[in-house]
Image: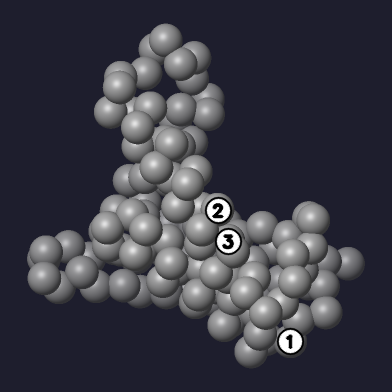
Amino acid sequence: MAFYTVFKYSIEAIMNGISTVFSVVLHDFPGLDPDQTHAAESRFMVAASRELGGPDQVLPSYDAFLAAHESVEADLSLEEVHRAAEWARAYEKARAAGFRGLGDPVDAYFEIVPF
């Protein structure tokens, strides 16, 4: 049975007057205790926010990636293609930050869940 812990993050982008709320969930990384899971999810969230220009950019970039993944490239605007590629790049950097010091199991992944 896969073990994962859900940890909810509420991030306020006060300088921009934007409130972004989402959770980061680490899936399929057996053997981690709750503190290790929380730390990995925190590192992922911070790195993704930094790579994308702030926490208020995480959900829009993720949504653009999902939309691009479900569309034909010819149907997407240049901005949508750019935003989707930006998410993919940021995800890889955030994933590496999240797994820093823990190894890199093949099946483990981080999920962004808006609430």
Q: Amino acid at mark 3?
A: Arg
| Residue 81 higher or lower than 66, as above or below | above
Of tags 2 and 1, the one toward the viewer is 2
* Quarter of the picture holding the N terminus: bottom right
Q: x%, y% of residue 68?
A: 46, 27
Numbered mark located on residue 33 in the image: 1
Which residue is under mark 3? Answer: 95
Lateral position of residue 69 relative to residue 17, left or right:
right
Which residue is under mark 2? Answer: 92
Q: Earlier in the sequence, mark 3 or mark 1?
A: 1
Q: Earlier in the sequence, mark 2 or mark 1?
A: 1
Query: Label 3 vs label 1: CA separation?
Result: 18 Å
Q: Residue at x 76, y 81 (%)?
A: 32
Q: Secondary structure at mark 1?
A: loop
* Quarter of the picture holding the C terminus: bottom left
Q: Quadrant of residue 6?
A: bottom right
Query: Label 2 vs label 1: CA separation?
Result: 23 Å
Within 10 Å of disc 1 (Cα), the crowding (few <14, some 14-19, many 20+) is few
Q: Amino acid at mark 1?
A: Asp
Lateral position of residue 32 relative to residue 8, left or right:
right
Q: x%, y% of residue 27?
A: 70, 63
Q: x%, y% of residue 63?
A: 40, 41
| Residue 52 higher or lower than 7, as above or below | above
Q: Quadrant of residue 7?
A: bottom right
